Every structure is written in structure tokens, then in C-alpha cells.
Amino acid sequence: MDGFVAACRKVGGWMEAAAGVLVFLMMALTVADVTLRYFGHPIFGSFEWISLMSAMVIGLAMPKTSLDRGHVEVDLLAAQRSRATRRLLAASTRLLGIALFCALTWFLVGKGIEAHQRGVVSAILQMPQHYLVFALAACAFAQCVALAADLVVRWQEAQP
């Protein structure tokens, strides 16, 4: 199981690095667009590029954030409970998260197939949308795997 968790952390790190590159590209595109707009030559479709990249940034950053336990966690229910109850709540929330992200993966794959078959393109740049939808489906699946890895880590932490 340690190999599984290590592999998840490695893939999560790559995804986080890709998200960082996209954030840098978003920043550079915004600066270039604002600068060129000042001279009367804005970058055509920059808003659409920023929107598409921001969707990918969110999808790419989720698995590593989950593995690092960097999400906001409200422990109102668990704060005054026993250790066993806290472990049960943590496992339950991870299992629920896995189920939800599996459902999201399934939904996005279906939407990606539909977008491909219908030839759905973006409004301004006329870029095919199914690539983005499939990429977000892959990110949702990676989140499922990351939650499973976190569940394994929490299980190992609970063992004496």
C-alpha cells in the first residue's frame, strides 16, 4: 500500500506542477492582454483562454490538495468525539467523496462523448470542448484515487 500512496503523491505532484504552469500562463496572458489593450490591440479570445485554463487549474490542483489535507475542514461534528468516532467520520467522508467524484467522472465522460458527437465548440475561439471535458473527467478520477490513498493513509495511522 505504501507504493500506491507514493505513486498517488507523485502523480499529484505532477498535476500540481501542471496547475502551477497554467496559473503562470494565465498571469502572463492577462498581463500581455492588458498591455496590448493599452495600445489598442487586445489579444483575441484571451478571456476564453483564461476561463478554460482556470477550470483545468482547479481540476489539476484537487488531488494534491487532498493528499496534503489542504482543504478547509469543518470539524464541528468530530471535535468532541472519541478517536474511534473521528476515524469513522474521516473514513465516511472519504468514501462519500470517492462516490461523488466517481459519479462526476462518469457524468463528465458522458458529457465529453456527447460534446464530441455533437461537435460542440467554444463561443469565441471555436475550439472543440470535448478535450477539456475529458481532461476534467481525468482530474475527477485522479481525485477519486487521491481520496482512496488518503483513506489508506488514515487507516494506517489508526493501526497500533
Image (cartoon, rainbow, N blue to C red):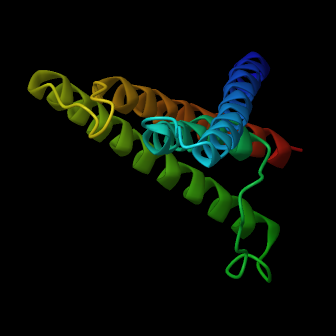
Q: Residue at x 70, y 69 (%)?
A: 85
Drawn side of residue 37 relative to residue 102, left or right: right
* Frontmost residue, 92 versus 76: 76
Res. 147 image quadrant: top right
Q: Is residue 11 above or below residue 151?
A: above
* Frontmost residue, 149 versus 61: 61
- What is the x, y in percent for residue 29? 63, 35
- What is the x, y in percent for residue 90? 67, 59
Q: In the current view of this chain or complex, which residue is farthest to the front? A: 39
* Frontmost residue, 91 versus 27: 27
- What is the x, y in percent for residue 79? 79, 79
Res. 80 image quadrant: bottom right
Drawn side of residue 71 relative to residue 137, left or right: right
Q: Is residue 35 above or below residue 89?
A: above
Q: Residue at x 73, y 34 (%)?
A: 24
Location of the N terminus (image quadrant): top right
Q: Residue at x 71, y 28 (%)?
A: 21
Q: In the current view of this chain or complex, which residue is farthest to the left? A: 118
Drawn side of residue 68 relative to residue 99, left or right: right
Location of the C terminus (image quadrant): top right
How many marks overall? 0
Drawn side of residue 68 relative to residue 144, left or right: right
Q: Is residue 10 above or below residue 143?
A: above
- What is the x, y in percent for residue 118? 10, 28
Q: Residue at x 36, y 44 (%)?
A: 104
